[in-house]
Amino acid sequence: MVAYGACKPTSRKRGAVQPFAHSDFLLRRGSGLDTVSQCELVEMFPELRYRLDKLGYAMYLAELVDSMTAEEEPSGAIFGLLLGTLRNLGNGDSELLMRAFEIKLLTVLGYRPCLEKCVLCEGPLRASEVIFHAGAGGVLCGTCAERYEGGLLCHRGTVELLKLLLRWEIGRLDQLQVGKAARKELREVLRRHMEYHLDRRMKSTRFLELLEHV
Ligand SMILES: [Zn+2]
């Protein structure tokens, strides 16, 4: 997509084509790139303009959506999720917002991990620690974990948090108090699950790791 003249200071397109602006576009189909015939700014996210950390998180969200969705296949659910997360990024707990976005996006795309019972034998999870196995598709009970290598040990509390992040609206996440250890487990569980389905490491993850002091 190309917006001719958008760089001119007097151009009416200028505001609408800024990175992370929510805008309406009217496009003219071309044989190569489409041309922007009209565009109108709908919403800006001011914090992303002067907070480098917030901009880093926004870039991560954009790259995640870009990596996990096909071009020209609109998804209202994913668009709504991205918009809601960007709106809350200014004041919210950025780290928890990223985790909620990840698990919700995975679910919309059909990659929701099994968190309620053992994904292999369907038995209940009784121990205080379980094994998360991205390849198996969720958590394993102690017996199945012995037969299935390569999982990640995590607390049941982390599994409960994941369920909560999935269920709660993005705007409610500020009510959650999550400690450092649980944050680390959440990040690792979701990172493994996404990398399993994504099949590659994203560029902005490195920046995110710096922000989250991994
Ligand atoms: Zn089992």
Image: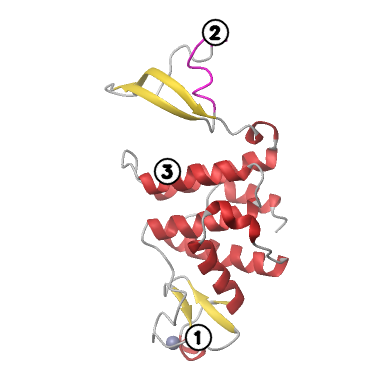
Label 3 neighbour load within 10 Å: few <14, some 14-19, many 20+: few
Return the residue found at the far top.
10
Left of 54 or right of it: where is 168? left
Nearest to the observer: residue 211 or residue 100: 100
Q: Residue at x 49, y 86 (%)?
A: 141
Judging by the rendered image, the residue that carries numbered circle 1 is 125
- How crowded pointer 2 is (Cα within 10 Å; few <14, some 14-19, many 20+) is rated as few
The mark nearer the N terminus, 3 or 1, is 3
Say which element carries label 1. Answer: loop
Residue 181 in the figure: left or right of residue 146? right
> If you read the primary sequence from the N terminus, does the residue marked by circle 2 or circle 3 appear first?
2
Amino acid type for the residue under numbered disc 1: Leu
Determine if residue 36 is in view.
yes
Q: Mark 1 or mark 2: name the one nearer the start of the chain.
A: 2
The amino acid marked with disc number 2 is Thr
Residue at the bottom extreme, as displayed: 143
Residue closer to the observer: 175 or 107: 175
Quadrant placement of the N terminus: top left
The quadrant where ligand 1 appears is: bottom left
Q: Residue at x 47, y 55 (%)?
A: 200
Q: CA distance from mark 1 to mark 2?
A: 62 Å
Q: Position of residue 38 (x, y in %)?
A: 39, 17
In the displayed structure, would residue 54 be above or below residue 183?
Answer: above
The image shows residue 213 at horizontal and vertical percentages of 73, 56
Q: Residue at x 64, y 41 (%)?
A: 90
* x and y percentages locating residue 58 in the rendered image: 57, 42
Dominant secondary structure of the magenta stretch?
Answer: loop
Distance, label 3 to label 1, CA atoms, is: 34 Å
Q: Secondary structure at mark 3?
A: helix
* Pointer 2 residue: 10
The residues colored magenta run: 8-18
Query: Residue 79: which numbered mark, if any?
Result: 3
